[in-house]
Amino acid sequence: MRLRVATAADVAAIAAIESVSFVDPWPPEAFLGLIGQPHVDCTVAETPEGTMAGYCVVLHAGPEGDLANLATAPEVRGRRVADALLTRALDAAAARGAAALFLEVREGNAPARALYARHGFLPVGRRPRYYRHPTEDALVLRRDLPAPSAAAG
Ligand SMILES: CC(C)(COP(=O)(O)OP(=O)(O)OC[C@H]1O[C@@H](n2cnc3c(N)ncnc32)[C@H](O)[C@@H]1OP(=O)(O)O)[C@@H](O)C(=O)NCCC(=O)NCCS
């Protein structure tokens, strides 16, 4: 699996995974508007054959990053693609000097919660009835990041 920075040419393949991964998917225009922006890290994973396997979107604002989107193609789930994307997102955020990454996750999304727990995300809040279809609370998770000098070393 190869990780690289997303480009506008990836949007159709990203949106295809997005539409089968979420009941309330982002439209392609949302990805198009973010890719290439200086405050955005959008990384894709692709197979050796060049097939899109997953993506991760982090929005940076000052000392904090928001892991706004992460999904992998259903046919490659369980093969550590999200693990690799998340590791890279954490490294990139630390290299930017971010102090912490935040994210929201459905309370009942066991695979995602297990993934984030493995990567050191801790619950810091709850947003009641945050999601639709079905209505469900979001858990807010936080992962502190090492200082840039420590990250570089
Ligand atoms: C959540 C998601 C991104 C995980 O992607 P993935 O590529 O299958 O995950 P990985 O193979 O890298 O798994 C890494 C870890 O995640 C957890 N995990 C992944 N799938 C899991 C499952 N079905 N059940 C329980 N834990 C799971 C485990 O901790 C796993 O570690 P392990 O292999 O040691 O058990 C993927 O299921 C997905 O795209 N889901 C739909 C979109 C979504 O929910 N995104 C997150 C929104 S907050």
Image: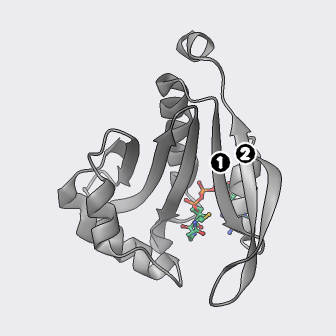
Q: Position of residue 2 (x, y in %)?
A: 35, 44
Q: Residues within 10 Å of mark 1 (few under 14, many from 20)?
A: many
Residue type at mark 1 is Phe
Q: Which residue does the image show at 30% across and 45% down from the upper left? A: 37
Residue type at mark 2 is Arg
User: The C terminus is located in which quarter?
Assistant: top right
**Residue identified by numbered label 1:** 102
Contact check, label 1 and label 2, Cβ < 8 Å? yes
User: How far is the residue under mark 1 from the one under mark 2?
Assistant: 5 Å
Label 1 sits on a secondary structure element that is: strand
Q: Residues within 10 Å of mark 2 (few under 14, many from 20)?
A: many
Q: Is residue 79 left or right of residue 102?
A: left
Q: Which residue does the image show at 45% across and 69% down from the upper left? A: 73
Check residue 142 in the rendering and tell me which mark sits there, or answer none.
2
Check residue 116 in the rendering and tell me which mark sits there, or answer none.
none
Marked residue nearer the N-terminal end (1 or 2): 1
Q: Which residue does the image show at 65% across and 48% down from the upper left? A: 102
Q: Position of residue 96 (x, y in %)?
A: 47, 26
Figure quadrant, ligand 1: bottom right
